[in-house]
Amino acid sequence: MNDSRSIRMHYGFRALLLLLFALYIGHLVQQDALHYYVAPKLARWIRLCPVPLSLMALSLGIQALFGKSARLCDCEHRLPRSGLNSVMLYGLFLFPLLLGFLLPDRSLGSAAAAKKGMALSYVADEAAEHVKFNAASPYLEEFAELAGKLYAQPVIQVYPEIFSETLGAIDLYKQQFEGRSITVTGFLYQENKDGTPKSYAVSRFLVQCCTADATPLGILLDPRTQISLPADTWIEVRGKLHISTYMGKEVIQITPEAIIPVPQPSTPYVYTNADSAAAWAEIQQSGLKAE
Amino acid sequence: MTLFSPLKALPLLIPAAFLITACILWLPGHPQVLNNAYTGAFKTGFIGILLEALPFVLLGALLSSLLRVFVPDEMISRWIPRRPLPAILFGCLLGILFPVCECGMIPLVRRLMHKGMPLYVAIVFILSGPILNPVVYGATLTAFRAHPELAYARMGLAFIVAAVIGLAVYATVRKTPLRLSIARESGEPHERSTRGGKLVAVFVHTSDEFFEMGKYLIIGCLLTSGIQTFMDQGSLAAIGGKPLGSYLFMMGLAYVLSLCSTSDAFVASTFLHTFPSGSLLAFMVLGPMLDFKNSLMLLSLFKTKFALYLFFMIVSTVFIGSVLASLWL
C-alpha cells in the first residue's frame, strides 16, 4: 500500500513523463520530422496528442501538489508498490524518449529493405495479360489511364507523389514501355543474395500508415552498369526502360545513361494516391505554371 | 501491480539496455557505435509503431475514463440484450460505434466490463471491434481493389470467429477470469478522491490507464521492431511453399508484425501473388485479434489460463475459418 507521500511522488513522475512525451511530439512537429515515422494521414492525429498529454500532466500535477492527503488513495492498487518496480516502469517509459531525443531521425534504407525484401514487380501476374491500355477491373482502369498519359511523354518522369502507381502502370504494360526514356529519383539499393551477381536498384519506401508497414519498391538497374556510389546514396537515374528476367520473373529494368547523386528529398518515403491519373495531371499543370 | 512471472523479467532488460546505452554514449567515438544502419532502422521502426498506436491508446483511455466518471453503472447493462444471441450481435456491432484500434480496446473493455458488460459480449467486442468497423473496411477495399471479395470475406470471417468464440465463452466460462487487481475494484464513488472536479478526475484516470497499458505497448513495440530489424522475411517465405506452411507463415507473420488493423491489408496485398488468398485472409483476421502487443495486454486483463484458452480458440477458429473460406474465394 502506498502512503500519500509516495502517491504524490508517482503522480509527479508521471506528470513529468507525460509532459516529456508531449514535448517530444512537439519537437518532431517543429523539426518537421514526423514523416520519418508515420504517413501524413496519421500525422494529423499525432499532432493532436500533445493536447490530452499535457492536460493529463496538468491534472496529475494538481493532484501531486494540491491534493489533500486524506483523499489521495491508491484504491485500485495500480501504482507500483516497490522501488524496483517503479524504476522499471518509469525506465520503460523513458526509453523511447531517450531513443527519440538522442539518436538522429533517419529514414529507412538498404538495411531495412534487405530484411523486408525488395519488391520489383507490383501487380498481379494475371493482370499482365492485358495488352492494350484498357482493362476490365476499375483498379486496372486507373493504371491504364495513367499508363496512357505516361506513354504520351517523351521522357517519363516518376513523381514521388504517385511513385508506386507509376511503377505499377509501367510494370503492367512492360511491353509497350520497352525502350522508353525515364527519370526516377530514389536511394541506391544493393542486393546481395547468395549465388546471384551483385544487382542494384533505385528505390523508395512505400508507407501506408507507419514505418512498421513500409515496403520497399524499386526498379532494377542494368547489372552491367559500373556503380561506385555507396548504398543508400540518393540518386537521380536517367535511362531507358527494358524488360529483363530476375530470379525467374519478368521485371522492368533501367539501362542508365546518367546516375547523378542528389540530396535526400525532404520527404524520403512515398505514399499511395487515391486517384493517380488526376494527381499526375495536377503535377503537370503546376509544373507548367512554374516554368 | 500483479504481473505474471515470465513478464516480470522482461522490463528488467530495459534498465540494462539503458545503462549500456548510457555507457556507449560516455565512450569517445560513440557516433560510430550507435549510428549504424541497424540502430537507425530499429529506432525508426520502434518510434513509428509507438507513434502510430499513441492516438488510439489515448483515445481508448479517454473513452474509458469518460465512461467511468460520467456513465452510471447500470446504464450499460440495461442496453445489452439479455439473451446471448442478440447480445453477441450487439457486441459485434459495437465496433461501428467505437472505431478504436486494438491498442485502445483493452482499457475501454475493462471499463465496460466493470460497468456490467458480460464477459462473452466483451470478448466478442475485443475480437470484432478492430475489424468490423467502417475505417478498416474502407482500407481493406482500397488495398484489394482488384479482389473486393477478400474484403467481404474478411468482414464475414471476423464476424463468425467473434460470434463462435463468444458462444463458446458463454457456454463454458462461469467464474470471472479477470485478474484480481481489477476484480477487486469496487464501485465506490471516486469523484471525491480527486481535487478539481470531474474534468480533472477524467484526466487523472486517463493517465492511470495510459501508464497501465503503455508498459505493454512499449514492450510490444520493442519486440516487434527488434524482430522487424533483424528477421529476414525472404528466408521465412520459403516455409510458405506448402499449403499448410503458407497458413502458418501468414498467421505467424500477423502475430509477430503487430500491424494496425487499418494498414495490415496493404501489407497483405503485397503477398497477393506469392500466397494463396485463404492465407491472406488468415493474416488479416488473426492480426487484429491477436498479436504481440495485443496478447501482452490481454494477459494483463485476464488470468493467464483464460488468456491462453482464448489465444488457442482464436488461432484455431481463424485457421479453420480461413481454410473453409478459401474454398469459396
Image (cartoon, coloured by chain):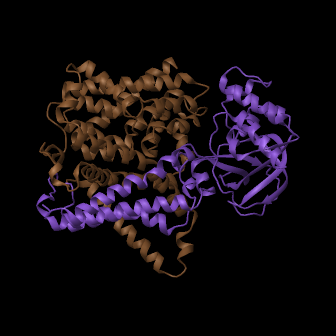
Q: Which quarter of the image is occupied by the N terminus of chain B?
A: bottom left
Residue A196 visible somewhere in the drawing: no
Q: Is residue A278 left or right of residue B32?
A: right
Q: Which is more toward the observer, A41 or B304?
A: A41
> Going by the image, does A260 lie left or right of A15?
right
- The correct choice, above or below, for B110 with respect to B209 in the image is above
Residue at 26% in and 29% down: B121
Taking the view exactly as shown, the residue that stands out farthest to the bottom is B28
Colour chosen for chain A: purple
- The residue at 15%/64% (across/down) is A4
- Specify whether residue B218 is in view: yes
Q: In the rendered image of this protein, does residue A102 appear above or below residue B185? A: below
Q: Where is residue B293 in the image (x, y as percent from the top left)?
A: 37, 47
Asked if residue B264 lies left or right of residue B170, the reply is right
Is residue B329 shown above or below B272? above
Numbered circles on residues, count: 0
Residue A97 spot, x, y in % from top left: 43, 64
Instruction: Give residue B159's position: percent from left, percent from top.
Output: 38, 24
User: Which residue occupies 56% across, 23% down?
Assistant: B148
Q: Residue at point 49% right, 22% down?
A: B152
Q: In the rendered view, does A189 fall on the left or right side of A59?
A: right
- For residue B21, which quarter of the picture? bottom left
In the image, B150 versus B213, the foreground residue is B213
Closest to the observer: A288 or A259?
A288
Q: Chain B rendered in what hue?
A: brown
Give residue A124's position: percent from left, percent from top: 66, 30
Q: Residue furthest front?
A: B196
Choose top left, top right, bottom left or bottom right for residue A177.
Answer: top right
